[in-house]
Image (spheres, rainbow, N blue to C red):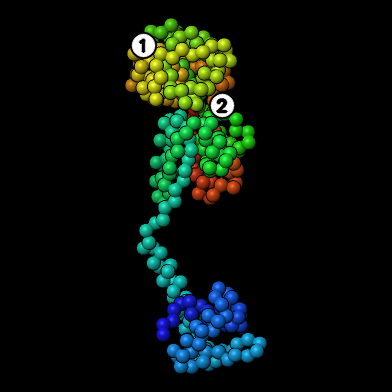
Amino acid sequence: MRFDFFDLQLVLHIVSTGSLTKGADRSAISLQAASERIKKLEQYFETPLFIRHTTGVELTTAGHAFVEHARQLMTQKEQLEQEMQRFRPPTTESLTLWCNSSAQSEYLPPLLPQYLVLHPEMNIDLHEAESSEIVEALTQGVANLGLVSSFFDTRHLQTKEFASDPLVLICPPTHNLAQHQQLNLVEALSYGFIGLKPHHSLQQSIETQAKLLGFNIQYRLRLPNFGAIAEVVAKGVGIAIMPARAAQRLQSDYDFHSIQLLGAWANRKLLLATQNFNQLPSSYQQFADFLLQHRPEKLA
C-alpha cells in the first residue's frame, strides 16, 4: 500500500474537526472513501490511529505520533514547493489593446517597449481597428481596453484623455495653400486630395465635415498609409490631411508644407476607453495606469 500527502492531509482534517465525516467533507471526498483510506493506513502501520466513538473520533498513542510527523511532512512539502518555485519558468499573460491606426503608428511605438521591459511576464497583442469598431467592441464586451478618436460617441463608456491628436493639412511647398500657417477646411476643398482608403475612419470623418460644408472631396489618389500619402504630396500631386504627429515624423523624409486646421473637429483627442476602469482585470488596470502616466507630450 502506498500513502501520499492527501492521506496525511485527510488525517489532519479529521483531527482538526474531531469527526471522520467532517474530515472527509473538508477533504472533498465521501465518508466511505475516507474510511477506506484510514483503514489502509492502519493496516500499513499495523496499528489503529483512531478510536471511534458515537460522537466522533479520538487519536490513539500511535495516532498522536502519526499526526506529529504528518504535520512536519506537510510543512516540509510547503517549503519544498516554495523553494522549487524559484526554478519554474516565469508564466506569461497577454493583454489585448484595441487601437486605431494613429495610436498604433504615432503614439504606442515608444511606449510599449518600456512597458514590456518593466513587465517581462506580460505580452501585448495590438488589435488595429477603426475607432467606430473599437467603440462597438468595447460596448459589446468583446474588448477590454481601447484607444479611440474623440470624434466618435463614447458617452456610454468611461474615457480618459491619452493624447492630443490634432489634424493638419499638408501640401507641396509650391502649392497655392503653402502661404498659410492655418486655415479652415472649406478653403481647401476646391483642390484635389490624396486620401486614405475609403474604409478608414479618419477619411470618413473628413468626408463628413466636407459634406457639412456642402462639398464632396475630389480624390486624385487613395493610399493605405500616411507615409505613402506624404511621398505623393511631396511630388506635387495633391494635398492631404493627416495627424500632426504623423506629419512631424514624415517631415524629415519628404518635402511638404504643414498647415494647422481650425475647428473643433480637427483638434481631436485620443481617448483611452473601457466600460469601467475599476472593473478591469488587475493586469489591464496596471497597463491603463502606465499608459496614462506616460501620456505623450503635446506637439510644440
Residue 17: quadrant of the picture: bottom right
Residue 30: quadrant of the picture: bottom right
Instruction: Kindly report the distance in space between the C-alpha atoms of the residues bearing marks 1 and 2.
Output: 30 Å
Residue 171 in sight = no
Where is residue 223? Give x, y as percent: 39, 22
In front here: 283 or 208? 208
Residue 84: quadrant of the picture: bottom left
Q: Which mark is residue 151?
A: 2
Q: Residue at x 46, y 93 (%)?
A: 46
Q: Residue at x 52, y 89 (%)?
A: 49
Mark 1 or mark 2, which has the lower sequence index? 2
Element type where label 2 sits in the image: loop
Where is residue 157? Give x, y as percent: 61, 37
Where is residue 181? Give x, y as percent: 48, 12
Quadrant in the picture for the N terminus: bottom left
- 182 lies left or right of 156: left
Number of marks in picture: 2
Amino acid type of the residue tagged 1 in the rendering: Gly
The residue sitting at the right extreme is 55
Where is residue 287? Give x, y as percent: 49, 44
Relative height, residue 125 to residue 162 (above, below)? below
Residue where numbered disc 1 is placed = 236
The residue sitting at the front extreme is 32
Q: Which mark is residue 33?
A: none
Element type where label 1 sits in the image: loop
Residues at discs 1 and 2 in contact (Cβ within 8 Å): no
Q: Residues within 10 Å of mark 1 (few under 14, many from 20)?
A: some
Amino acid type of the residue tagged 2 in the rendering: Phe
In front here: 278 or 24? 24
Q: Residue at x 46, y 23 (%)?
A: 198
